[in-house]
Amino acid sequence: MIETKQDLLEQLLGGPVRVDAVLVKDVGKSRTIHDDVLVTDDFSEILRLPELDVVIEAIVNVEPGYTYLRRAIEAGLYVVTANKELFANKGFELRQLAEKRGVKVCFEATVAGGVPIIGALKQLLRFNQVVKVEAILNGTMNYILTKMREDQVSLEEALLQAQRLGYAEADPANDVEGFDVLFKVVILLELLTGRKIDWDLVRCSGISDITPADISQASVRGERIKHVGSLVVDDQGQVEAEVRPVSVGESHKLYAIEGVDNAIVVTGDLTGDLVFQGPGAGKYPTASIMIEDLVSIFQSIKKAAVSR
C-alpha cells in the first residue's frame, strides 16, 4: 500500500515514504520485496539503520511484539501497531514510555479494523464526556452470526466459510470465545479513563454456545443476535463493562450491522448517540488505517521541525 500510494503520500507529506526494512520469521522464503529493502529476522539490525523514523508492527500475541516496540520507543522511534492483544496488555505502559521519550504510539488499527474510532474518541474527549459505548467489534463473529441466520447453518459451517474468505484465523479461539473483543474493550476503557484497567472488571463470553435454534428463536421475536462489547463510565470515572452475545430488536442501532462490518455507538454527555460503522476484518481496512497513523506521525514530525 505504501508503494502503490506514493504519489498521494508525497502530496500529503511533501516527500516520499521509504520502506527500509521488513522483519520476518523465515529470511529464505520467497517474497516480492525490492532488493534495496533489508529483509531480516534480527530486530537489532533494523534498529541500527540510519534515519529510521517509524516502526510498524502487526504481529500476533504479546511477545515478541512487546519487546520489539519497547526497544523501538527506547531508541526514540515512533510506533504504529495493530496488535490488540499486545496493546490491551501493555499499551498503557508503552504509551507512558513513549511520552517520556518524546515520541508517539499510534494504535488506531487495534480496535474496529477500518473504523477510525480511536481518533474520533480523542476528538470527543476534548470537551465531551463519553458516558457509554456499545459496539460490534469483531467482524469474524458478526459474519458468523449473519451467515447462521441468513443461510440457516451451524456455527461450525459459518466459521469454515469465514476462514475460506480470510476473515477468520486458522485458530479462531480468540474470536469465537470473545477474547478479541475483550482486548478491544480494555483498550477503549484505558483511553476513556486514562488509567490501567483491571481485566476482572470486564465480564466476557463468546458465541461458541450459540445454536441455529437460538438464532431462529430470536428471528421469531423480530430480533437478531449480535456479539456486543459495552462499557459505561460514570462521573467519578468508575466503569462497568461486559462482552457477550445480545439479542437486539429492530430499533437498536446495532440491529442492521451485518457481515464483517463493525459498528460503535458512542454516547456523549453533550453529543448524544454517534454511530461509527465500517469493515472490521480483512487486510486492506487494517492496512489503510495503519497508513493513516503513519501519515499522522510524519505530519507531526514535520510540524515539530518547522516550529523549531
Image: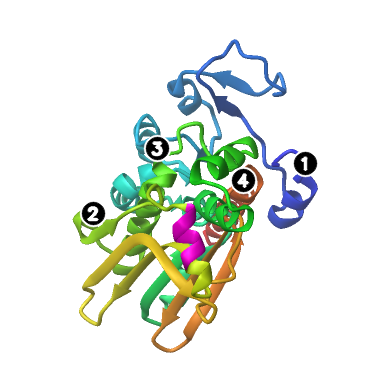
Are dots 4 and 3 in contact, CB under 8 Å? Answer: no
Q: Residue at x 50, y 51 (%)?
A: 141
Residue at numbered disc 2: 199
Which corner quadrant of the image does residue 27 belong to?
Answer: top right
Which corner quadrant of the image does residue 126 belong to?
Answer: bottom left
Q: Which mark is residue 282?
A: 4
Say whether disc 4 or disc 2 marks the residue closer to the N-terminus: 2
Say whether disc 3 or disc 2 marks the residue closer to the N-terminus: 3
How many other residues sit within 10 Å of disc 1, few (<14), some (14-19) or many (≥20)?
few
Task: For marks 1 and 2, give the CA distance.
Answer: 40 Å
Residue at numbered disc 3: 69
Task: For marks 3 and 2, give the CA distance.
Answer: 22 Å
Q: Is residue 239 left or right of residue 130?
A: left
Type of residue at label 3?
Leu
Tell me the chief SS of the magenta region: helix
Are dots 3 and 1 in contact, CB under 8 Å? Answer: no
How many other residues sit within 10 Å of disc 3, few (<14), some (14-19) or many (≥20)?
many
Type of residue at label 4?
Gly
**Rendered image coloring scheme:** rainbow
Does 29 appear in magenta?
A: no
| Total numbered badges shown on the rendered structure | 4
Question: x%, y% of residue 259?
Answer: 61, 56
Residue at numbered disc 1: 4
The mark closer to the camera, 4 or 3, is 4
Say whether disc 1 or disc 4 marks the residue closer to the N-terminus: 1
How many other residues sit within 10 Å of disc 2, few (<14), some (14-19) or many (≥20)?
some
Say whether disc 4 or disc 3 marks the residue closer to the N-terminus: 3
Type of residue at label 1?
Thr
